[in-house]
Amino acid sequence: MQRLHFRESSRVAFSLLAATGIALTACSSNGGSGSGSTTPATSGGSPTSSATAAGGEPASGSGAIAAIKKNWATFFSAKTPTTRRIALLQDGDKVAKVIKAQSGSSLAAAASAKVSHVALTGTSQASVTYSIYVGGQAALPNQQGVAVYQDGVWKVGLVSFCALLKIENAGNSSGLPAACTGS
C-alpha cells in the first residue's frame, strides 16, 4: 500500500510540475553566453559585485540573487500570464507551445514555488534550491535547478525545464520539443 501511495504521489507531483511548465531536475548547462568563473555568492553570503547589464537585472551579487528568487517564484506562479512565463524561461520561445498547452491545468492553478538557496556559479549561471508547493503544502521540497542570465534577465534554465519534460515522458526523449533533444 505504501508503494502505491508513493507512486501516485510521484505521478501527481510530476503532473503538477509539467502543468506549471517548470523543470525540477538539477542539470548542468552552458546556459547561454559565457562560462567564466567568479567567486560564488550565495543567499547567505556577501555580494561579489552589483554589475548590471544596461537596462537589465544585476548580473552578480545580492541583486542577482534577489532577482533569481523573484523570477523563479514568478515563473511558478499560477497568476503569471503565459507570455511572462515564456519570457522567464531561457529560450522560452522555443518551447512556448508546450508552456501554453500545459498552463490551463487545475494543478497548475494551485502551484507555487519558493527559492531557499542560490549560488552564482559563473558569469551567467546559478544553481537554485527551491521547493514546489501545491495548495500551500510542500509537494517537492529542496529541488535543484539552474538559473541562466540571458538578455539582462535571470531566467529558469531550459535544461531544467527539458529534464522535467523527459521525466513526465517516462524518461524518454522521443516526442519532446526539438529544443530539448538537440534536434
Image: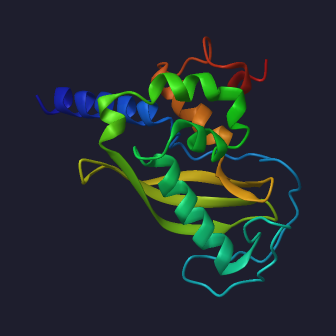
Residue closer to the observer: 140 or 49: 49
Q: Position of residue 20 (x, y in %)?
A: 44, 36
Is 20 situated left or right of 71 in this image?
Answer: left
- Residue 135 at x, y percent in the picture: 23, 48
Q: Nearer the viewer, residue 1 or 129?
A: 129
Residue 148 position within the rendered picture, expressed as x and y whole percent measured from the top left: 71, 53
Is 90 on the left-hand or right-hand side of 118?
A: right
Is residue 161 positioned above or below 49 on the image? above
Quarter occupied by the N terminus: top left
Residue at the farthest top position? 175
2 vs 140: above or below: above
Residue at 77% across / 69% down in the picture?
Answer: 59
Q: Residue furthest left?
A: 1
Count of numbered labels shown in the rendering: 0
Identity of the residue drawn at 78% across and 23% down: 182
Q: Is residue 13 visible?
A: no
Q: Is residue 69 left or right of residue 4?
A: right
- Quadrant into which the C terminus falls: top right
Residue occupying the point 71% across, 75% down: 40
- 3 sits left or right of 74 in the view: left
Residue 121 visible (yes or no):
yes
Q: Nearer the viewer, residue 12 or 155?
A: 155
Residue under the point 29% across and 42% down: 110
Above-or-below relation of 27 to 8: below
Residue 171 in percent (x, y) is at 52, 22
Q: Is residue 129 above or below residue 18?
A: below
